[in-house]
């Protein structure tokens, strides 16, 4: 049947900026001055999660999609007992993650954003020790380790020291380790980051296979195609808030008009915007700065001639056009005004 996850008004505030936030990674900063007259220093608060609530159904692949610093990893950290929330509650099945940590941990497998393998061990030893930690018998953990090494194409390197592995091999081994005790819920934090295309496709196949066993899988990603290909439902998160959630198809069809045409003129006066709004099929026009304009419509290339005519009528020059078909990228742009890569 699978195990569900419930998050209720989670809030996480850091007292000092984490490295990603210090680089402008997307966290919201709030500077507050202490009330004491002798206090000279300002207290900085980094709001990583801002009253996030969501429910993940048993046995589904659920994605958290957003740019670096949006709050994805903090959410995973709270659900896997690595990060304590400032307020709110989280449940793995019936267990409150922070009040019943032992029970919750027995149900989950975790693949962190960066591999944290013991370089003094071989691949096989890492899997066997992990199985022993979760109480598996010698026979069971040996069989399980052999199966996973084969599945992740690591059999020929099973008895090699992990420090000799490439980054992609380490990532595959990290996922195999997380699956070693056959958890009901598998958390994958940016699992495809830095992987070559072949390894990425292998990972996708493994995730789908594990899902067919009725397991609940939660992954974070900033790759649109990964979220679209794997996730049954997803939530788009930015600046610690959920800005949209649903199936990939529901989210894509929620965009006004579907198509996004990103236009750049030498200038964008109001009469140009008025002309663009009057074009057939156009549902929304947004001036993003003095020269750039986002146009949402139910068509793409067939609008170009009308855009050119509108520009000529307003006495401006059209300098660039970029057309995006309905996608999660255009959804993110619609809600935030910026790209996932910004």
Image (cartoon, rainbow, N blue to C red):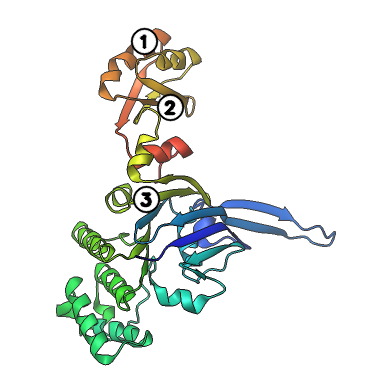
User: Element at badge 2?
Assistant: strand
Residue under circle 2?
292
User: Element at badge 3?
Assistant: strand
Mark 3 vs 2, N-terminal side: 3
* Residue found 26% across the figure and 91% down from its top: 138
Residue under circle 3?
233
- Position of residue 263 relative to residue 44, above or below, is above
- Position of residue 44 relative to residue 308, above or below, is below
* Residue found 66% across the figure and 57% down from its top: 44
In the depicted view, which residue is nearer to us: 108 or 176? 108
Residue under circle 1?
312
Mark 2 vs 1, N-terminal side: 2
* Residue found 83% across the figure and 60% down from its top: 36
* Image position of 33 (left or right of 106): right
Asked if the residue under mark 1 is in contact with the one under mark 3, i.e. CB atoms within 8 Å, the reply is no
Q: Distance of mark 3 from mark 2, alpha carbons?
A: 32 Å
| Crowd rating for badge 1 (residues with CA inside 10 Å; few <14, some 14–19, many 20+) | few
Q: Position of residue 78 (x, y in %)?
A: 51, 66
């Amino acid at each position: 049947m699978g195990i569900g996850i419930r998050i209720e008004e989670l809030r996480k505030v850091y007292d000092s900026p984490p490295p990603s936030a210090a680089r402008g990674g997307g966290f919201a900063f709030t500077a507050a001055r202490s009330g004491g007259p002798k206090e000279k220093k300002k207290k900085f608060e980094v709001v990583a999660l801002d009253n996030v609530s969501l429910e993940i159904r048993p046995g589904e692949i659920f994605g958290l999609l957003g740019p670096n610093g949006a709050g994805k990893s903090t959410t995973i950290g709270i659900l896997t007992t690595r990060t304590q929330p400032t307020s709110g509650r989280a449940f793995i099945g019936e267990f409150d993650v922070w009040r019943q940590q032992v029970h919750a941990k027995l149900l989950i497998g975790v693949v962190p954003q960066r591999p944290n393998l013991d370089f003094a061990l071989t691949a096989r030893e890492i899997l066997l020790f992990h199985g022993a930690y979760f109480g598996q018998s010698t026979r069971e953990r040996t069989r399980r380790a052999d199966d996973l090494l084969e599945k992740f194409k690591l059999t020929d390197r099973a008895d090699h020291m992990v420090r000799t592995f490439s980054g992609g091999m380490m990532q595959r081994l990290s996922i195999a380790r997380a699956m070693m005790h056959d958890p009901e819920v598998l958390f994958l934090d940016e699992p495809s980051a830095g992987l070559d295309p072949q390894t990425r496709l292998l990972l996708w196949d493994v995730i789908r296979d594990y899902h067919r066993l009725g397991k609940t899988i939660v992954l974070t990603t900033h790759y649109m195609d990964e979220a679209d290909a794997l996730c049954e439902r997803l939530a788009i998160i930015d600046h610690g808030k959920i800005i949209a959630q649903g199936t990939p198809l529901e989210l894509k069809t929620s965009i006004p008009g579907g198509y996004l045409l990103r236009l750049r003129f030498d200038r964008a006066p109001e009469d140009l915007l008025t002309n663009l709004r009057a074009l057939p099929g156009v549902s929304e026009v947004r001036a993003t700065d003095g020269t750039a304009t986002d146009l949402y419509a139910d068509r793409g290339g067939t609008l170009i001639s009308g855009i050119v005519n509108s520009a000529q009528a307003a006495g401006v020059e059209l300098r660039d056009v970029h057309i995006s078909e309905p996608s999660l990228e255009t959804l993110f742009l619609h809600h935030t005004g910026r790209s996932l890569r910004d």
